[in-house]
Image (cartoon, rainbow, N blue to C red):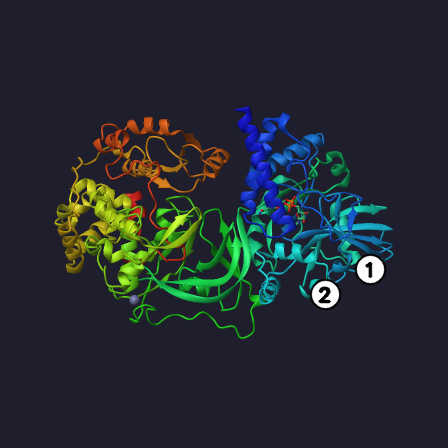
Amino acid sequence: MAASVEKKIADLRQQINHHNQLYYQQARPEISDREFDKLLQELIDLEKQHPELLTADSPTQRVGGDVQTALKPVSHAVPMMSIENTYSEQEVRAFDERVKKSLDDAQPAYVLEPKIDGTSISLRYEEGVLVLAATRGRGNVGDDVTINARTIGAIPLRLTSSEAHTVPAIVEVRGEVYMDNADFQLVNKEIVADGEAPYANPRNLTAGTLRRLDPKIVARRKLRFLAHGLGQVEPNPARSYWEWMQLLRAWGLPLPKEVKHVANVDEAIEQIHAFEKIRPTLPYMTDGIVMKVDAFDQRDRLGATSKAPRWVIAYKYETEQQPTILNSVDWQVGKGGSLTPVGRVEPVFIGGVTVSNVTLHNIDQIRKLDLHLGDTVVIERAGEVIPYLVQAIKEKRPAGAKTVGEPTQCPTCQTDVEREALPEDTAAYRCLNHECSEYFERVRVKKAKLPAACPICAGKIEVLASGIDLYCPNQDCPDQIKGRLLWYCNRSQMDIEGVGDKLVEQLVDKGLVRTFADLYQLKAEDLSGMTSEVEQGEKLVTRTVGEKVANKVVENIQKSKGQKLERLLAGLGIHHVGNRVAHVIAGAFGSLDAIASATAEQLSAVNEIGDVIADSVRDFFHNESSLAVVRALQAAGVDPKQDVKKAADVASQLFAGKTIVVTGSMKTMTRQQIEELIVQLGGKASGSVSKKTSFVVAGEEAGSKLEKARELGVEVLTEEQFIERARAAAPVDGAAAAVETPAPTQSSSPEPPKPERPKSVRPKSGRSKSEGSSTKAAKNADETDSLF
Ligand SMILES: NC(=O)c1ccc[n+]([C@@H]2O[C@H](COP(=O)([O-])OP(=O)(O)OC[C@H]3O[C@@H](n4cnc5c(N)ncnc54)[C@H](O)[C@@H]3O)[C@@H](O)[C@H]2O)c1
Ligand SMILES: [Zn+2]
């Protein structure tokens, strides 16, 4: 045990040192700050538990940066330290408690400032004249960057002294050197034109630039400066930071407009939330708020650790934001024919990945954001959520920029586009968490019933207030055919491994497959020479389909004949029929034939199935072309049957109304099986943990989701405890069987193989006329009426 902890610690230190080096020395990080902070936190926790293993050179004990040998090292009279940071409100309160305790329960006032994403600098003025500018370096020693700092317009070379505000003999002003979003884009373009690799974000470019040896380059790069602190000051004319700030202004130093003085932690948290709203509108990037004790005597009493002062904390926002440029907009056709605009942006490194495409959702969204081609835009990403375009910065719009146009013809089949507007009192929304089942759907509800968060995963939703859908009415549009096939083969439906984006595209383009049934006629020879994409770690790699793979794919397709009826039913892509509704209908009727011949009345008599769903299912099976598809599937041998469940199985609703997250690796069942069981028992399986999560089932090596659950105080069950709980539903044969034996179609591998991962930009959303929200409808039969 001890040896493994030691190894873990050594391992973490090595990783952290590696990332520090990339971040500070090369200004080219490979992982997101959130990921980095997690590694660091893990190390801090381990060192706390094992103080005997703590060493002075641990990265937890040092300020992260370093000095560059090419520049002259200078020591700081007052060290430039790190700031302890947190992502949680609770920890901000805990910080306030700690501070009060050290101050004998006195309530300190705080100053809040935006945490500008740049690099810090110390400016030393003697008799009012700038004599030295230095980087933070490793805290006590930094790099002399005076000649570079002199090129920055916002940095005064001489302070303005007046009778009312005399400048002390020695003044060290600390602050942030940073770059405006729009300047970053321009400069990065020039860098690329010079044959260098572009920088991931303005912070890195600033840090890299400030330490250049040639001040002419620095001068061209439009660096800016805002003050946020002090070093050595003699004599110090201020008793508090707030006073200090007023002096700085009088001496001619720039400060951010957004600074706030607050009386207690409640007000501080209020400001933290308020700032989150204006964050994307600022011309520079911020990653949080810095909260500082105002009074200098209180600061002195609080002191510092080896790494950071005890009187300051940074609250960092979960959502990372980065600026980029919107170059063009393409329209993509979804499986239901809807046209979704996709923005092509200058590649931007955000949340640990490089993003060059962002979904813009629909034409309304484009108009609401007032997007023009060439705009500087802010992209946001929180955890696993898909990247999102939050804002266009209008002040930075190039002259003569064109608005984004609306297509009149389908970009794929050139059929005239049709328009469908939402009825008056309705609105549409969709979930932005791509792990959520509702992510794919645009859900329409009465305006009054709009949820604040996704009812499935409690994640962030996007409200499309008026919602105009543009769609291609041609069912034979190749993109729609591809979308339907992909949906059918997806992991959550027929789970046909190996049939993903790339392969479907070629199969349809070569005319080999048009309907689901055509898949079953494929022979291995048909596939040879095609290319497919496979996941290798984080990356998607393209490879040519060889004989072995072709055989395997054909085998997988054939094997899918054994999938359960509910998966087939969901795979058909019937409007309003997602996995949950499919499960209910399959359980009530037992076969495709029984479902096909059911009347709307018989369908709506089933618990959870409302009129809208019933009509939609009836319409599908009474439509000649879709019925032909079903008959062809049956003829190909895809016709699963199952026992019909007795109506009103109370026990089957064991998890009704519960949202459950499964994470980590399991021993007796696969994660997917557990999720299926949750759905069978009336619950919702969600991909992300929030306050609304009922409980989390955590297997081995559960990572951030488990952490989040603990942080939020959400109940956590082990796999065994979960199975125990699910067994309470034993009277239901389905559930009992699922608990006892894995479903027959599952392989014995611990994690079911994933099919090719669909590209995140590919719109999975169809117009809701054709897809709607099964999940929403299923949640509560009463709400079915609010669906359209
Ligand atoms: N992605 C990676 O690989 C990687 C590697 C190392 C570090 N990092 C990130 O760098 C940070 C490391 O922390 P750090 O020690 O450099 O401190 P920090 O960057 O979190 O905070 C201190 C710095 O904040 C800046 N700052 C901005 N506004 C300020 C204000 N109003 N008042 C005071 N300071 C302000 C200053 O430059 C100061 O040096 C973490 O956020 C970490 O995630 C990332
Ligand atoms: Zn089309």
Pick the residue in front: 662 or 269.
Answer: 662
Instruction: Identify the mark at residue 487; answer none if there is no mark.
Output: none
The residue lying furthest to the bottom in this view is: 400
Q: Percent from the top left, x then y, of residue 406?
A: 39, 70
**CB of mark 2 near ligand 1 (< 8 Å):** no
Q: What is the three-letter code of the residue carrying label 2?
A: Lys
Task: Give the secondary structure at mark 1.
Answer: loop
Side of 342 relative to 229 (left or right): left
Residue at mark 2: 216
Q: Percent from the top left, x then y, of residue 605?
A: 18, 43
3D distance between C-alphas at marks 1 and 2: 21 Å
The residue drawn where x is 82% and y is 50% is 171
Pick the residue in front: 363 or 49.
Answer: 49
User: Which mark is first along the chain, 2 or 1?
Assistant: 1
One can see residue 167 in this view: yes
Q: What is the three-letter code of the residue carrying label 1?
A: Arg
Task: Give the secondary structure at mark 2.
Answer: helix
One can see residue 785 in this view: no
The residue drawn where x is 58% and y is 56% is 201
**CB of mark 1 near ligand 1 (< 8 Å):** no
Q: Is residue 267 above or below residue 332?
A: above
Determine the image quadrant of residue 684.
top left
Marks 1 and 2: which is nearer the front?
2
The residue lying furthest to the front in this view is: 547
Side of 408 relative to 174 (left or right): left
Q: Percent from the top left, x then y, of residue 70?
A: 73, 53
Q: Residues within 10 Å of mark 2 (few under 14, many from 20)?
A: few
Instruction: Identify the mark at residue 158; answer none if there is no mark.
Output: 1
Pick the residue in front: 602 or 382.
Answer: 382
Q: Quadrant of the C terminus?
A: bottom left
Q: Is residue 530 above or below residue 665?
A: below
